[in-house]
Image: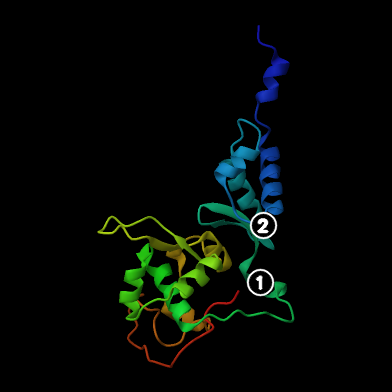
Amino acid sequence: MPDPENESLFEAPPMAEQERMVEAILFATAEPVTLAELGSRMPMGSDPAEALALLRKRYAGRGVNVVKVGEAWAVRTAPDLGFLMRHEVVETRKLSRAAIETLAIVAYHQPVTRAEIEEIRGVSVSRGTIDLLIEMDWIRLGRRKMTPGRPVTFVVTQAFLDHFGLESARDLPGLKELRAAGLLDNRPPPGADLPDPDAEDDGDQTDMFEE
């Protein structure tokens, strides 16, 4: 006859306890955590998806929110309170025009090959530009294209999405939003193919992104 006491060792904790576990993991981990990673840390039989949904609902409207970053989850300051986290001195890392254009093309056209980036920009892309964006962990290698030579592609990273508060690349802002935020001049991101009849050339913009 089965031992009820031993069986209880394999029962999942109450959902309220599972919610507390998810909360603890997200607060203790700087990087976003996937559901699979949550499940691997929680007791057998736990339902991290349900616990996460409950936790997300509980934090809605609070000073911090549970947000999705790519395929992972994290606890982040509520967007409208971000100004409270700014220091008196802000260190800005400026990117070259080439790096900004390359990053914009990857973000709006991923997965994209180096040749495609060069075709959209109309000029060659130096290895240093690609290496810099990879070093910053804003782009990474994607799958190879099933075309002659099977060239590698580039896609934006989870760190890029996290830095700009995006759930996925589909949430990238349009031209009007970028300009309203002061992040773009009157020229569209290269290859963005977004309609903007009022576009004018105001010269180079070298500080679109801050780190």
Identify which residue, 201 or 54, lies in the foreground: 201
Q: Which residue is mark 1?
A: 82
| Left or right of 105 on screen, residue 1 | right
Identify which residue, 52 or 29, lies in the foreground: 29
Quadrant for the N terminus in the image: top right
User: Which residue is located at x 55 percent, y 52 percent?
Assistant: 72
Answer with the quarter of the image where residue 118 lies. Answer: bottom left
Question: Quick one: label 1, few (<14), some, or many (20+) residues within 10 Å?
Answer: few
Q: Residue 62 at what x, y percent from top left? A: 68, 60
Q: Secondary structure at mark 1?
A: helix
Identify which residue, 38 or 23, lies in the foreground: 38
Please say if 183 is above or below 1: below
User: Which residue is located at x 51 percent, y 66 percent?
Assistant: 134
| Left or right of 196 on screen, residue 32 | right
| Left or right of 171 on screen, residue 10 | right
Answer with the quarter of the image where residue 112 lies. Answer: bottom left
Determine which of the numbered discs, if any, sits on residue 31 in the image.
Answer: none
| Name of the residue lying farthest toward the bottom | 202
Is residue 134 among the parts visible in the rendering?
A: yes
Determine which of the numbered discs, if any, sits on residue 30 in the image.
Answer: 2
Is residue 193 among the parts visible in the rendering?
A: no
Pick whichever of labels 2 and 1 is earlier in the sequence. 2
Q: Residue 102 at what x, y percent from top left? A: 42, 74
Q: Residue 147 at what x, y percent from top left? A: 26, 58
Callout in the foreground (2, 1)? 2
Q: Are marks 2 and 1 in contact (CB under 8 Å)?
A: no
Please say if 136 is above or below 44: below
